[in-house]
Amino acid sequence: MKINIYYGGRGLMDDPTLYVIGKMQEVLEELHVTVERYNLYELKNSITTLPQTLKTADGIILASTVEWYGIGGYMQQFLDACWFYGDKEKISQLYMSPVVMSTTYGEREGKLTLIDAWEILGGLPCSGICGYIADTSLLEGNEDYNKIIEKKAENMYRAINQKMPSFPASNQAVKQKIAVNKNIDLTPQESEQLSQYAADDSYVKRQKEDIQELTSLFRDLMGSEAEEGKEEYIQEFKEHFKPQAGFRATYKIQLEGKRKPFIIEVDGASNSYYYGSVDRADVEIQMSRETLEDIIHARMTFQRAFMAGAMKMKGDFKTLRTLDQIFTFMEGGLL
C-alpha cells in the first residue's frame, strides 16, 4: 500500500499540522505502508504537475493549517490542478483523509472544504482530523491527543485495505448537473502533458513572448492600414482639382465600410480633404467604394451615379453637378 501526504502549510516549525502528519506517517510505516510526502510550499512552481503523483497512490492525506482563513493558497492550487489535469478515473478510486489544524479559527470549515472538494472531484473521503492547537508543545505532550492521531491513521489504513464503500454525496449530483467542465475533453496523457507545460516557466514565458510579438505585429499592421485609410482617395482628388472662381461648397461623402465620412471643402482655388466630421455640408452623399472608384477612374460621373441610383444625395443638386466640373476625372467634365 502507498499513501501520499500533500502538505499545504508554510513549513513553520511550530505548525501543529506538521506534528500530526508526522505522527500519522510513523503509524502507517509501522503498518508497512509506503508514505511519500509532498511539501507544496517547496514545490510551488510545479504544483500543476503533482496530480501525476496520484497514479501510484492507494490513498492520500490532504493536510493544511488555518492561519487566518481557509485552507491556504498552496492547497487550493493543488486542488485546482487535480480538477484541470488530474486523472478523474484514478481519483475516483482514491481515499482521502483530511488533516486541518488551526492556530486561530476555522479548522472545521477547512476540513469540510477538503472533503467537499474531494467528493466533487469524484474521490472517496474517509475519517480525518481537525483541531485548534495554539501551542504545539501541548499537542506533543498530550497522550490522549496522540492516541486520536494513531487511531485516525489506523482507520485510514483499514478503509483502504478493506476498500470500504461510502454512500453517494449530494455534491456529486450537483457536479453532474451544473458543474460541467467546459474545457476540452482530454485524455489522461494529454492532461499530464498540459500540466507539464503549465508548470514549465520557460515554456510559459516563451508563449507570452510569442503572443506579445504577434500582438505587436498585428498592431503595426492595423496601424499602417489606419494610416493608409486616412489618406485614401485624397491624392486622386487633389490631382484632378480644377478651381472655379467664387465657388464655395462643402461635400460630405459617406463611403460604405468607412467609419468616418470623407469631407471635401472648396473655397475658390483653395481646398481641403479629410476624414472626420463637419457641422454643415452643402451636399451629403452616400455611396459604395466601388462607385467612387468608378468615378475616379473615369468610368462614371457623380451625376450619372446619382441618376443610375448608385448613390444617394441630400442637398443642392446644382452643387452636386459642380463636383464633376471642379474634379475632372473624366476629360471634358460633366456630360
Image (tube, grey):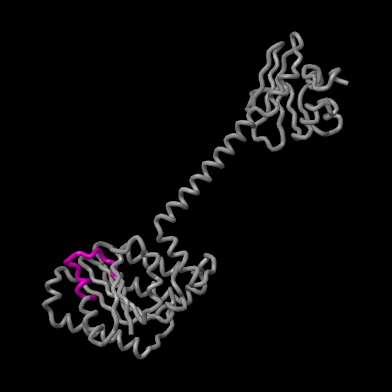
Residue 101 coordinates in the image, percent (x, y): 23, 71
Camera sees residue 34? yes
Residue 102 quadrant? bottom left
Image quarter of the C terminus: top right
Answer above or below: position of 71 versus 122. above
In front here: 299 or 272? 299
Residue located 43% across and 74% down the image: 121
Looking at the picture, tell me which residue is in the foreground, 163 or 207.
207
Quadrant of the rendered image containing residue 97: bottom left
- Residue lying furthest top: 245
* Residue 288 falls in image quadrant: top right
Relative to 307, is 155 above or below? below
Tell me: residue 86, above or below residue 219.
below
Magenta run includes residue 93: no
Q: Is residue 30 left or right of residue 289?
A: left
Image coordinates of residue 111 in percent, x first then y, are: 30, 73
Residue visible at 72% across and 17% down?
Answer: 249
- Residue placed at 22% from the left, 74% from the top? 131
